[in-house]
Amino acid sequence: MSNILITLDYELFFGSKVGTLENCILTPTSKLVDILNRYGVKATFFVDSGYLVKLKELKGQFPVLEKEYEAISSQIKSLDRDGHSIQLHIHPHWEDSTFNGKRWIIDTKRYRLHQFSDSQIDDIVYRYKRVLTNMVGDKIFAYRAGGWCIQPFAKIKNALKKHNIYLDSTLFKNGKNDSHTHYFNFRGMPEKTEWRFEDDPLEEKEDGFFKEIPISDYRLSPLFFWKLVYFKKFGGAEHQTFGDGLAAGGSQLDKLRMLTRYTHSVVSIDGYKSSFLEKAYHSFLKRRDYKNFVIIGHPKSMSQYSLKKLERFILKNKNRNYITIRSFENDL
Ligand SMILES: [Zn+2]
């Protein structure tokens, strides 16, 4: 039987306005967990641990950050106690970001882990993993790259291996982005839902150290994005996303491409994207050799509408096998 994994990138925004911890993370996560708990479904949270490292570093100087640190650690610990899985999400630009007493000044000149030296990468993976291990214990073995920027993998491979991170869940079919902050290109990845690899996640290697569990994808017509833009503008309160920050913008060219051509999207519970959850699952079930249906979401980008869609999806597919990334622990 195939598995369903609900995975969340648990983070603030990284544009000119990061938004509040309350509205981007705490409130939407507890709304989501209320639904999941109702049906006994467990999820995986890829925690932006650079934020935690920064809070820990600065909380002695700023009481407001001390409060944030308390609040976010208490939610992470309670997610862990409830049986959800806490895993590693790295946004290394926290290294260059500062707090001015009132707000975060986010500097994304080094948005990709690859822009740091080998020894810095090693140190970042070590510290970002440790802050999570200190909260929930020795359970951290899976990774999702910040902004999907995992390539070239060879540059970060040794650091992940050394700190015993052996599972990745970053790739999605035909994913591609090349901007001043981002770079990734997943064209040509294996047509599977799990495989092993060593130096390049796009290249299956049976005895590789790492395992890839890609995010599921769905092919979207341009019409979809016209609807998305429409509901965002005119959909009313139900379509308002919970987060109150601003995203570091995608390129205008990408936006234009989505509105004019067929594109591949991740299967997501963010905002209006949740409208194709059920359809995406049906087309997944028709494929051969497909084991894991991996849904992604961001608490900051969810809305009342998307939570309703998720609940409807779970209700319709109640007897399915919902698992977390923890099911793959020690699966070497
Ligand atoms: Zn992220």
Image (spheres, helix red, strand yellow):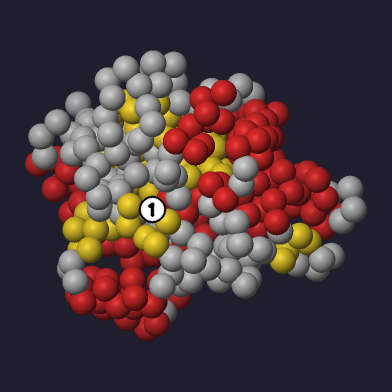
* Front residue of this view, candidates 121 and 173: 121
Q: Nearer the viewer, residue 45 or 90?
A: 90
Label 1 sits on a secondary structure element that is strand
Seen from the viewer's position, the closer of residues 165 and 224 is: 165
Q: Indicate the quadrant containing the C terminus: top left, top right, bottom left or bottom right.
A: top left
Residue at point 61% right, 47% down? 116
Spot the residue most to the bottom: 234
Rendered location of residue 3, percent (x, y): 27, 32
Q: Does residue 321 appear left or right of residue 106 in this picture?
A: left
The x and y percentages for residue 323 are: 36, 30
Residue 39 seen in this snapshot: no
Q: Which residue is mark 1?
A: 184
Mark 1 is surrounded, within 10 Å at the Cα level, by few (under 14), some (14 to 19) or many (20 or more) other residues, namely: some
The residue drawn where x is 74% and y is 49% is 54
Q: Is mark 1 within 8 Å of ligand 1?
A: no
- Residue type marked 1: Phe
Could you tell whether 108 is left or right of 68 in the image? left
Above/below status of 260 relative to 87: below
**Position of 123 relative to 205 (above/below):** below
Location of residue 208 by image quarter: top left
Q: Is 33 left, or right, of 96 in this rendering?
A: left
Tell me what residue is drawn at x 47 percent, y 54 percent. Answer: 147
Quadrant (top left/top right/bottom left/bottom right) for the N terminus? top left
Q: How many marks?
A: 1
Q: Is residue 100 visible?
A: yes
Q: Is residue 177 left or right of residue 221?
A: right
The outermost residue toward the right is 61
Relative image position of residue 262 (x, y in whole percent): 18, 67
| Quarter holding residue 41 | top left
Q: Residue furthest front?
A: 117
The x and y percentages for residue 11 are 57, 53
Q: Residue at x 24, y 58 (%)?
A: 264
